[in-house]
């Protein structure tokens, strides 16, 4: 009797084909996620040739969901959200509401159940965190104000989607699943029971887990075994996810997410993220491949207009909704375009929602295929939309007076108030950026009574600084009018505490034009940038790793000099 090797053949085929198509996707400048989904289609039942075991792939994908959501929890940052809460929270809720409403309307037109239409709308409303972070990082925009707003916006989307993942299973009967098992229960009872179970689980994790997990990881770390530490993290993530599902009726996705959030509080969170990354990546690939296996590519031929409408909502529905919201909140056109394009795609949460809808009987295979077609196409086109932002902005500004007014919106914090103390406006330091580095520089200047004006793109930070009696202006220091408002012409020094190498030259040119004798200090994030900036003589450059090495070396030398 020959052994059953369907598990091995499925994993081998999934990894092998995903590797090839993921590599090809990266070569043509689209996310590898697209290649993984295509790999699933290729080894799935909808295409000729080898067909992998869908049941095994589905079970492996459950592990992928756990580890994917665990990773999201590990990187969940309340600080990212809090720093841009006034735009990210209302913006994300309005944008998701508008896109979900569009999905509900389309589902109603197609005579879908309320649950199917709701899942369609939610799936089309949540952008891919993986795709967004990669796009921002590739373009050097992750640490910019636009990047921080986009990330905060996605944090809100993630929280709303996690809540949907929690509530959909118990509400499946009310929303019209195939069995209707829960349809006879009152809605308030179903929701109340679910929220109580979720609340009990989260309370247990944050009261007990926050104390037990750090202690447990410390005990494992003391063994010095790297593989044992990795095993401990993975076992904790999967164990908590399974326990949440088994004893609290909570979805494994939420269980894994909460496990990641709690583990983030540990001092070993960075090591946990680093050590488990290869395994998380591997099982995430299996998850995307298994979803691809459920796709029927013939949906594009059988229902081309349905597919086109879903794709248009996924891309332009989110894009237009975000654009309108950001402009309504009186942010400039450049910020609105950047954030809108960032959200003009859908990804992993859409796939998880579609898979959940299929398992609950709220979506049929055609509905899943439509959502996955939107994922594939929107992600593939997103990089081209990013590339079109600047040409589009220039064209619109050239053609439209309205756009020019939008680009130059009057920011209430863009000008220093007339009551600003004169000591801040002559011989001062102009400090660009009030993040981790900028805040420490400001504290040092406060201790020595050195006057300074902060230039920061985050309006909420500027508002807080002004309430504390400090001089601060809102805007990008690459714009001459912003540095003029900071009285750069009378400043003794320009200190750029943000690693924004793309705009260093523009800042320096404005500063030296208005103040030829000004001293300029720049912060660099990479050795290559440090060498280039030093060679060009723009100013004195400080490279983080080099300064850290100097500080540690000085400490060692001081210890042995006596």
Image (cartoon, helix red, strand yellow):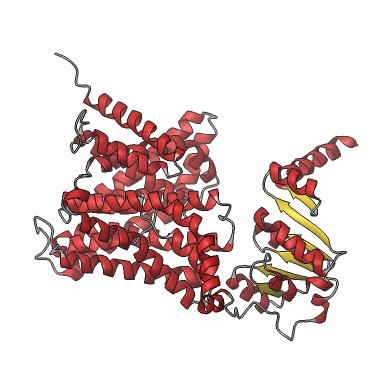
Residue occupying image coordinates x 75% and y 82%: 420
Residue 389, given in percent of the width and then of the height, sits at: 50, 61
**In the depicted structure, whether residue 525 falls above or below residue 445:** above
Residue occupying image coordinates x 43% and y 73%: 324
Q: Nearer the viewer, residue 259 or 491?
A: 491
Q: Which residue lies furthest to the bottom in this view?
A: 419
Residue occupying image coordinates x 28% and y 50%: 373
Q: In which quarter of the image is residue 477?
A: bottom right
Residue 390, given in percent of the width and then of the height, sits at: 54, 61
On the question of residue 446 being in view, the answer is: no
Residue 396, given in percent of the width and then of the height, sits at: 51, 70
Residue occupying image coordinates x 49% and y 65%: 337
Question: Left or right: 161 with respect to 219?
Answer: left
Question: Left or right: 42 with respect to 271?
Answer: left
Residue 99, given in percent of the width and then of the height, sits at: 32, 67
**In the depicted structure, whether residue 238 falls above or below residue 361:** above
Question: Left or right: 435 with respect to 390?
Answer: right
On the question of residue 145 being in view, the answer is: yes
Which quarter of the figure is the C terminus placed in?
A: top right
Q: Which of 453 and 529 is in front in this view?
A: 529
Q: Which residue lies furthest to the top in this view?
A: 1
Which quarter of the figure is the N terminus placed in?
A: top left
């Amino acid at each position: 009797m020959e052994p059953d090797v369907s598990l091995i053949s499925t994993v081998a085929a999934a990894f092998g084909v995903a590797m090839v198509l993921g590599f090809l996707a990266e070569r043509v400048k689209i996310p590898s996620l697209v290649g993984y989904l295509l790999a699933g289609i290729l080894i799935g039942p909808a295409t000729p040739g080898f067909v992998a075991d869908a049941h095994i792939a589905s079970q492996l994908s459950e592990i992928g969901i756990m580890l994917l959501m665990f990773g999201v929890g590990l990187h969940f940052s309340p600080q990212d959200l809090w720093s841009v809460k006034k735009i990210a929270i209302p913006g994300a809720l309005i944008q998701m509401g508008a896109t979900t409403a569009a999905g509900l309307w389309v589902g109603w037109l197609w005579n879908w159940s309320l649950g199917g239409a709701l899942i369609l709308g939610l799936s089309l409303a949540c952008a891919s965190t993986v795709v967004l972070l990669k796009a921002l990082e590739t373009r050097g925009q992750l640490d910019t104000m636009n990047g921080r707003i986009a990330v905060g916006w996605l944090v809100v989307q993630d929280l709303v989607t996690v809540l949907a993942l929690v509530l959909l299973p118990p509400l499946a009967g009310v929303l019209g699943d195939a069995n209707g098992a829960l349809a006879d229960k009152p809605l308030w009872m179903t929701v109340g029971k679910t929220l109580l179970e979720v609340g009990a689980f989260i309370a247990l994790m944050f009261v007990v887990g926050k104390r037990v997990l750090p202690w447990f990881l410390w005990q494992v770390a003391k063994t010095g075994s790297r593989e044992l530490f990795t095993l401990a993290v993975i076992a904790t993530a999967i164990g908590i996810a399974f326990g949440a599902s088994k004893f609290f009726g909570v979805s494994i996705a939420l269980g894994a997410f909460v496990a990641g959030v709690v583990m983030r509080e540990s001092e070993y969170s960075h090591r946990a993220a680093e050590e488990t990354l290869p395994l998380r990546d591997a099982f995430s690939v299996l998850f995307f491949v298994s979803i691809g296996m459920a796709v029927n590519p013939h949906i594009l031929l059988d229902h081309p207009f349905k597919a086109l409408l879903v794709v248009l909502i996924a891309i332009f529905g989110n894009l237009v909704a975000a654009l309108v919201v950001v402009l309504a909140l009186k942010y400039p056109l450049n910020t609105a375009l950047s954030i809108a394009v960032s959200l003009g795609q859908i990804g992993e949460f859409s796939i998880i929602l579609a898979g959940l809808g299929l398992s609950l009987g709220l979506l049929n295979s055609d509905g899943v295929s439509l959502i996955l077609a939107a994922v594939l196409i929107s992600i593939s086109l997103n990089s081209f939309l990013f590339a079109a932002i600047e040409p589009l902005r220039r064209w619109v500004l050239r053609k439209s007076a309205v756009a020019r007014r939008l680009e130059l919106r009057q920011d209430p914090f863009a000008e220093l108030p007339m009551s600003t103390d004169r000591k801040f406006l002559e011989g001062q330091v102009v400090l660009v950026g009030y993040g981790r580095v900028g805040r420490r520089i400001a504290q040092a200047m406060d201790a020595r009574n050195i006057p300074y004006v902060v230039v920061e793109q985050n309006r909420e930070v500027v508002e807080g600084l002004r309430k504390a009696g400090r001089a601060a202006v809102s805007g990008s220091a690459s714009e001459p009018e912003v540095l003029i408002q900071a009285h750069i012409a009378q400043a003794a020094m320009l200190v750029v505490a943000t690693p924004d190498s793309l705009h260093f030259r523009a800042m320096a040119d404005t500063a030296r034009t208005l103040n030829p004798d000004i001293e300029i200090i720049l912060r660099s994030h990479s050795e290559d940038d440090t060498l280039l900036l030093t060679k060009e003589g723009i100013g004195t450059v400080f490279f983080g790793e080099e300064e850290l090495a100097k500080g540690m070396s000085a400490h060692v030398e001081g210890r042995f000099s006596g």
